Structure formats: structure tokens, C-alpha cells
Amino acid sequence: MILNQQQIQDIIVGNPNKDLVNKGKAYNKTMRRHVYGEGLEVHLSTIEGYEKEALHKLRVKYTRSNKDLFARIDRPVDKVFSARGGSIYFNLPDELNQRAAALAMDVRDGYSIRKWVEMFWRPHVVDDPYGLVFVEMMSVQNALQARTQGRSFVYPTYKSITCIYDYLPKGQKLDYVVFNVTAAEKREMGLKEDEQIYRLVDDANDYIVKRTDKDRVRILDKFTIPNFFGEVPALVNSDIVDPQFAVGFLSPYDKAVELAEHFCMKGSIKITHDIMHGFPKYYEYADDCGECSGTGWKGEDKCPTCKGTGKSAMTKVSDVKLLPYPKKTGGEEDVKVTPDVAGYITPSKDYYEIATSDLQLLEDVMNVTIWGTMSRVRSQGMAINGDGAAKTATEIMDELKPQADRLHPFSDMAERRHRMILDFTIRLNMSMPTYKGSSVNYGRRYLIEGPDVIWTKYSESREKNVSQEVLNDLLVEYYEAKYYNDEVKLNVLIKLKDVEPYIHNTNEELETWPIPPFERVRKAYYLDWRTSRTMAFILVHTVEELKSDLTTYTIKKVEEGVGLKDDTPLAVKLGVGGTQALQAWMADPNMDPEAKENAAVFVFGVKPEVAPKIVAKKQLPAPGGPQQQPDPIV
């Protein structure tokens, strides 16, 4: 939208979207109270009819905010930025991709675009859905310096709804936006701090506007520049539209706000109870004060030792209470009071247990409301049912699937902001006004399931003989879940997955398979080869080069006559199929003895000094027939 001067004046004077902005500010205030604890003291009002002023002050002073609660609720969003399987397509010629990638890796203060979205957009989509991701451009001098250094001269910013005077959303984009100019910005421009100055951005220009009187404004041409982006370079923080209003936006946690209010109130009552009733009460049978003989008076004044009580209390660890032996009086023995001469009255646990259970239940309800699954914080642990029984892998997977579904909207919103920043960065830094835009995918493998759960799925799939493709995917998921903080080890294992022969099967399982015997030997020597190669060696070589290196290593070991690390008979190592194949080769009348020896050594892994002993030098007559097959090899 391109505004004319009259429209600009109408917007500044009339503030047509004031109600929308004020609603956003109020919403931001509520969410920041829950997420950061701001303004909690003012919000906690007296519970009329039940709470005295002194008790209310105590509750306000010691109440804990919901900051930790929302930190736990927000934790699954970490998975959006650690998810596997994402990609970025720059939609540029190959020779320009490297330049675009370099710009995206340092878009502001050393942050990549992805990291900026995680660090700055992610928290504010929760607490400020009406706020903006707004792309700025450096001043001319700074832009020239950045361009010389190969850095981007456009950069993303977060604009709070509190700094916005007026704006007109069109979906998540804007037709225009008007910012309040701060006192510091006025001083920087050489303007008076008490002047009403606004910054208005539309599709054509970036204006600085001064309100000269009640109904008139003036555009300050000195500070007004063209809008080189060609549109308002902004997106509203949240894609979630408020269904109650024609225009409005919601936090992803909006449906749990009322529960959070209740959680805060119940938590404040509990902490007050803990302070008032959480301390044990000491009691003792008191002796008469030795100073006043139990009267409480010294002359006309109260006894300074017992302060008028007439009793002497044990106040020091070294104090001793002396009791006389029980005596018989009138045929009855005195009542024995020890060891109950002193002690503590322990507070009841009933309310504490009820209040703690209520707070945990509220947190569970909030988690189910937002994520579709209960909180994983339990005194018994994440993998334990309420009755104490261990959860099965299927139960854990069923509980986590709704959470993965709820993460998709977060990924969609993050991708959209990332794409906007990237497109503006490429369009201006690379002077491509007709650039059609990039494609950004954050991936959807959220690594919610732990490695133990994924390994169980993988093991069960192996037992069911599912396809190799499915097993490969599960094995990669297991590696990603276990080594997501160790990129080097992860890349090594994913590469070796395609190097190890028959990775999903054991040597024993391969014995009955009709595969080339040499493949069994490669499988048997794989572990020795793997331990002899460094991670750096594996990383710098391709899969095909590593396969070739494994083959060369295996042949070398066979030629050296180096057996495997056990004394298992060759027939057992080869299996039934391998042994039969070896027998057939040794009995083949078309092969000379030298060829048979070479085959035994290089194909079947027979030691060179043993090979001549198992090769038949001539054909022997078979009983009842013209020829006899060689004796079986044991």
C-alpha cells in the first residue's frame, strides 16, 4: 500500500487502529506476567472475605511466578530447531549459492538467520503475538563497510507492540506501520524530545513525520528515505488468528492462560500456608523460674529473667532438665512423663499433599491442552506409569505423537519468518530486485523419542523382517537421537551405515544366506577394519572409497594368513551354503589345483598354508561309479 500525504495525516491524527494496538499491548502484558513474572505483585489482589491485609502482603511478598511453569511447557519447542531432515533452497545459479549461504550465516551480530529466529522470534511469538519481525537497513556508511567485509547490510529486528503507534495487518503482512520515535532517536536526529515524532513505513517510503498541532502533520523530508524493500518488510509474530475478532493474533499457549492464572493463585496460597504452618512447634514442661520462684515478679517489677511468666525455658543446647525419680504416694507410683517431657508438634501433611497434587494436576491439564500429552515431570520418572509399572515403548510413542503433531505449526511459522529474512537479504545484498524467493524447510524429525525407545522400535522391526529401507531410517533416527550433540560422531556413523556389509544382520544369521562367501569374510573383518581407521579418515573419504578400503584390508589380512580373533572352525564361519560352495569349487574338474588354491584363499578366507591340503590333486573313483566327490571339509 502506497499512502498519499492526506492518508498519512489521517493515520497520525486519527490513529484508526488504536483499539487493535491497545488490545495487543494488554495481551502482551498478560503473557509477560506469566512468562517472565513481570507485574505479578500488582496483579495479585486480596481474596475478599477470606484474606486479611497483612496476610495478603505476605502472599504477595513470597509468591512465585509462573516463569518456571512456562519454561517447562515451552521445552518441546527446542525440537523445532534441532529437527533433522531440513533443507534450504536458494533458487539461485550454482555460482551464487555460496554467496547467499555466507550472507545467511551472519545476518546480525554473528547470528545466522536460523539462530536469530530461534533466539529472538521464538520467545516473542509466545509473549507478544502482535509484535513484528521487521527487517531494517543500515545507514549508507555502515552499509558500505558491511558490503566491503562481505556481510549483509540488511538485518532482522524484533519490534514490540509497545513501540507501535498504529498498523494495518493484511494477513501476517502489513499495509503500513507507524512506530513511536524514542527520545534517544529524536536526539540522534537533532529533534526536541517533547516533539511528537513518528516513523511511518509503507510500500514506497520510510517517512519521519512530525505532528505540528492537533489536526496537522508535516513530513520531514530530511530524514525520509525510499523503501528499497518494495513492501513493508515485516511479518506479525504469530500466524494464529484470534477467531473472536476480525483482526487479532494469539499466542500458541493462549488456551492455557486461564489455567495459568489459577495455577498462580493456588501456588500463592500454598506458599502462604507453608510459611504460616510449615514450622514445627516446640513444647516442654517448664520449671519455675529460679529468679522469682515462679511468681513472675521481683518486687514491684516483672521478673527480668522470665519476663513475668514465672517459668524457666530451656533455650540453650547446654541446658539440662533435672527430674526426680518417680515415688510411690499412697500406694500409687507417680506418673512417668519421660521421654515426653519436651518435643515438637509436627504440622499436618494433608494440605501440603493436596495442594502439591492440585498444582501437578493443573500442569498436566495445561500440557494436555497445549501438547496433547501430560507433563513428563514425575517423581517416579518419565518412563513409569502412575501405578509404578514401567511404560512400554508403544505407550511412550503413543504419548509423544500428539506432541509432534502440535510442533508442526511452530515449524511452519519459523520457516516463514526465516524465508522472509533470507529473501530480503538476497534481494538487496545481491542486487536482485526480481528475485523470486527461496524455499526453507526446518525438517520434521523432531527427535522427541529417546534413543532407548527408537532402539526398541528398530529391534522389533528387525525381528519382523521389515524392509531394509525402513531399518535404515530407524537406525539413522537412533543415531540422531543419541548423538544429536556430537555432529562428528553422528556423521561418521551415518556414513558407516552404508559401508558395513549387511549391517542389520549378525555373522551367525548370514551363515545360512546364499551370499558370496567373500561377503561373509568382509563382514567378519569389518570391526577390525573400523577400529584401525580414524574418524578423520572416514569423514574425508566417500562411501565407495571406504568400501574399497574395507575390501583391500580384508584381502590383505587373508593373504597374511591372519585369522579372525577366534578359533571357530572354517565350516562354521562359512555356514552350510559357504561350505557347500567351497566343496563344489574344490571338486570342479575344469579348475586346475593352483586356481583352486587361490579361490580358497581369496574367496573363502582359507589360510595359504592350509589351502594345498584341501585341494584334490586328482579325481578319485567313486564307489559304484566312475568318479567320487572329495571328502567333505569339516
Image (spheres, rainbow, N blue to C red):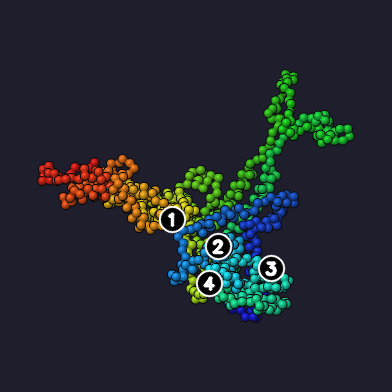
Viewport quadrant of the N terminus: bottom right
The residue depicted at 67 percent of the width and 56 percent of the height is 40
Return the mark for residue 429.
4
Query: For the residue marked with disc 2, what is the amino acid?
Result: Tyr
- Of mark 4 and mark 1, the one earlier in the sequence is 4
- Say which amino acid is labelled 1: Asn
Tell me whether circle 1 and circle 3 mark residues in contact (CB < 8 Å): no
SS at circle 4: helix
Please give the label number shown on residue 111.
2
* Residue 545, x across and y down, in percent: 35, 57
Which callout, 4 or 3, points at the residue further toward the start of the chain? 3
Question: Which is nearer the N-term, disc 1 or disc 3?
Answer: 3
> Can the viewer see residue 20 in this picture?
yes
Secondary structure of the residue carrying tag 1 is helix
Mark 1, residue position = 491
Q: Report, in whole angstroms, how far the alpha carbon at label 2 lies from the one at label 4.
A: 17 Å
Q: Which mark is residue 184?
A: 3
